[in-house]
Amino acid sequence: MTEIVLEQRIAAPPATVYRYLTEEDKWVLWQGVAASFDAREGGLFSAQMPNGMNARGRFVRLVPDQLVVFTWGWVDRPGIPPGSTEVEISLEPDGDETVLVLTHRSIPDDEASLQKMGWTHYLPRLAAAAEGKPVDPDTGLG
């Protein structure tokens, strides 16, 4: 199993970034074409990607403006079934900015490069959206 750790600096306060991780209408501004979730511990997390694939899991832990933890997997990709991995996103204030650290755990080794490619693509989109910059509709990785 593989663990991915990525960092993204965002020119917005943690409270703003947190909303982009817990509100459906804000989530789809940076990832996917639709999202449906109940941002509370145990609540369902579901996001539809532009290629039609569906990510699904549950929120595990939420600390407003500091931490979002949810399980992650794919309805349509047997290598990572729904809820089989865990994504932890911590938000650390740094002046007027936020240092976001994403840790994606328990990824099957043969799926790790694709997951890393995805998060590497999406974190800058999250930063731009949270900073109030225009973000083109999500068309996927490429």
Image (cartoon, rainbow, N blue to C red):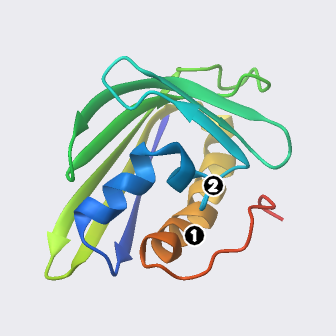
- In terms of sequence position, does the residue under pointer 1 or pointer 2 come before the other? 2
| Residue drawn 53% across the image and 82% down it | 133
Q: Amino acid type of disc 2?
A: Gln
Dot 1 amino acid type: Arg
Who's the residue at 51% across and 30% down the image?
Answer: 37
Q: Is residue 35 left or right of residue 78?
A: left
Specify the quadrant of the image occupied by residue 139. bottom right
> Could you say whether the residue bearing mark 1 is in a helix, strand or loop?
helix
Q: Give whichever of 84, 49 is nearer the camera.
A: 49
Residue at horizontal 51%, vertical 55%? 26
Q: Residues within 10 Å of mark 2 (few under 14, many from 20)?
A: many
Task: Give how far across and how far down residue 41 sits, in percent.
Answer: 30, 22
Compared to residue 33, the image places residue 70 above or below, namely: above
Between 21 and 86, which is closer to the camera in this rendering? 21
Residue 109: x, y in percent? 60, 36
Note whether 25 is above or below 136 in the view shown. above
Q: Position of residue 134 (x, y in %)?
A: 61, 80
The residue tagged with tag 2: helix, strand or loop? loop
Instruction: Tell me if 22 is positioned left or right of 93 in this view.
Output: right
Alpha carbons under labels 1 and 2: distance apart: 8 Å
Is there CB contact under 8 Å for labels 1 and 2? yes
Residue 28 point in image, percent of width and height = 62, 53
User: Which residue is depicted at the point 75% across and 66% down?
Assistant: 137
Dot 2 corresponds to which residue? Answer: 31
Per the image, the residue denoted by label 1 is 125
